[in-house]
Image (cartoon, rainbow, N blue to C red):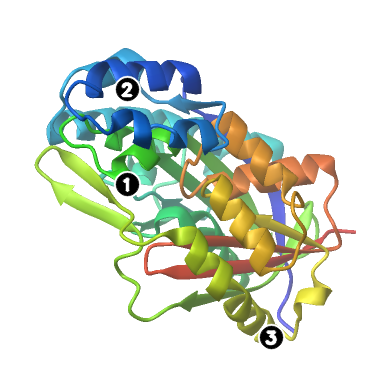
Amino acid sequence: MPPPVALLSLATASAPHALPQDQVIEAARGLLETRFPNFDRMAKVFETAGVRSRQSVVPLEWFLEPRDWPERAEAYLAGADDLFAAAAKSALDQASLTGQEVDIIVSVSSTGIATPSLEARAMERLGFRPDAARVPVFGLGCAGGVTGLALAARLARASPGATVLLVVVETCTLSFRLDELTKADIIATALFGDGAAACVLRSGDGGFAHVDGMAEHTWPGTLDIMGWRVERKGLGVVFDRAIPPFVRSNLKPAMTQMLAAQSLTLEDIDQFVCHPGGMKVIEAIESSLDLGQGRLEHERAVLGDHGNMSAPTVLFVLDRARRAGLGGRIAMSSLGPGFTSSVVTLSRAA
């Protein structure tokens, strides 16, 4: 058996500007209803999204003026840098470590482009060693939290004794657009928030949980379900097929297959920790996996307080679950562009 990989710490960081849902919908109405006659009908999603508030790297007023790609890119770099540093430092502090003691840094982000990448921009700020290995990952979208954790665990297992820092950062709100109004744009405006999460991993015992296994499943012919369009005015969200019905019909067979590859069944899982893509997605997951309506309470709480922050959101859920008391065997799950399901199984440390 390979050695266990310990999760030594887990930290989250929220963006500085609150976006209460009632204020967002009023701002959107003031900007859009005269230009788009169907706004009121489409705006009902604000009420059913399950979001009370979220956070953004820029204040609400920033969205009231047209923004182009360079402005959005500048806001991404500034906001993502600060979120990266805050989450990483908190995770290192929890593990009683400094940046000098980090051997491998995995950075996950899909809502902006940073070259040099985020961990390189944070080298001096966090005191990383010049010889630290850097692994920036782009394009995973909402699956990035779980897939990034799987990658970090693989690196820790392959490098016994190495300290691996995973940092997941997204600034989804910067995709809010005023130049068009599609169903996908309204859903994004009603759901998206910004945030970051980080954790420290090392092969061996200790920590609050152990990473036992990981798996992925990508459905063929599903590239149109979720993603980004790259346009002159910024990234445009792609939701070309309804996600909840797809999840309700297809998640359970894929989950069964992914767990079977780890010699597990659905009945072996004591607790699911899932990415809350939206209220209807949460309900679809509960239905597909036969969990019972309302079972994913931590997911609903994170969605309500922070919105859908894409990749880091599931780590916010894991943090809540940890504070409430983890089950014996946990399956972390998220869905993202591809269309892909990613699963990491954890066991509570003794």
Q: Secondary structure at mark 2?
A: helix
Locate residue 200, reporting x and y percent: 62, 50
Label 2 belongs to which residue? 28
Label 1 belongs to which residue? 184
Gap in angstroms between the C-alphas marked 3 and 1: 35 Å
**Cβ–Cβ below 8 Å for labels 2 and 1?**
no
- Residue 330 in view of the camera: yes
> Does residue 161 lie above or below 260 as drawn?
above
Question: Number of numbered discs present?
Answer: 3
Q: Decide: few, some or many residues near mark 2? Use Cα within 10 Å; few <14, some 14-19, many ≥20.
A: some
Q: Quadrant of the C terminus?
A: bottom right
First in residue order: circle 2 vs circle 3: 2
Q: Residue at x 79, y 69 (%)?
A: 269
Q: Residue at x 66, y 45 (%)?
A: 299
Q: Quadrant of the N terminus?
A: bottom right
Q: Decide: few, some or many residues near mark 1? Use Cα within 10 Å; few <14, some 14-19, many ≥20.
A: some
Q: Nearer the viewer, residue 213 or 171?
A: 171
Question: 335 left or right of 343?
Answer: left
Q: Amino acid at mark 3?
A: Ala
Question: 138 left or right of 55?
Answer: left
Label 3 belongs to which residue? 260
Res 254 quadrant in image: bottom right
Res 35 quadrant in image: top left
First in residue order: circle 2 vs circle 1: 2
Q: Secondary structure at mark 3?
A: helix
Q: Nearer the viewer, residue 206 or 62?
A: 62
Mark 2, mark 3: which one is toward the viewer?
Answer: 2
Residue extending furthest toward the left = 232
Q: Amino acid at mark 1?
A: Ala
Locate residue 206, reporting x and y percent: 80, 56
